[in-house]
Amino acid sequence: MAQFKKIVLYAAIVFVLYTIINSPDRAAEIVQLGFEGISNAAQGVGNFMTALIS
């Protein structure tokens, strides 16, 4: 099982590098969307906590 995880990890790294090299603009858009999603989720949690306190 550990060998399988290692193979999947290497495959994911190769895929990410391939994507960045072949289309860096699209890769940057995907990373930006990911960070925006994380930011929106954190903001939602903050709003929820604020609503609980008030």
Image (tube, helix red, strand yellow):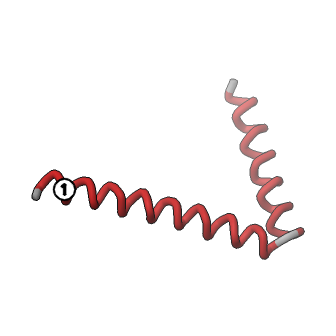
The amino acid pointed to by label 1 is Ala
Q: Nearer the viewer, residue 49 or 4?
A: 49
Residue 37 screen position, x and y as percent: 52, 60
23 with respect to 13 (left or right): right
Question: Residue sitting at 53 percent across and 67 percent down?
Answer: 36
Residue 25 screen position, x and y as percent: 78, 75
Circle 1 residues within 10 Å: few <14, some 14–19, many ≥20: few
Q: Secondary structure at mark 1?
A: helix
Report which quarter residue 28 is drawn in: bottom right
- In the image, residue 25 sits, relative to residue 54, either above or below, namely below
Of all residues shown, which one is farthest toward the bottom? Answer: 25
Residue 19 screen position, x and y as percent: 83, 62
Q: Nearer the viewer, residue 17 or 51?
A: 51
30 with respect to 40 (left or right): right
Residue 14 screen position, x and y as percent: 82, 54
Of all residues shown, which one is farthest toward the right? Answer: 22
| Residue matched to label 1 | 51
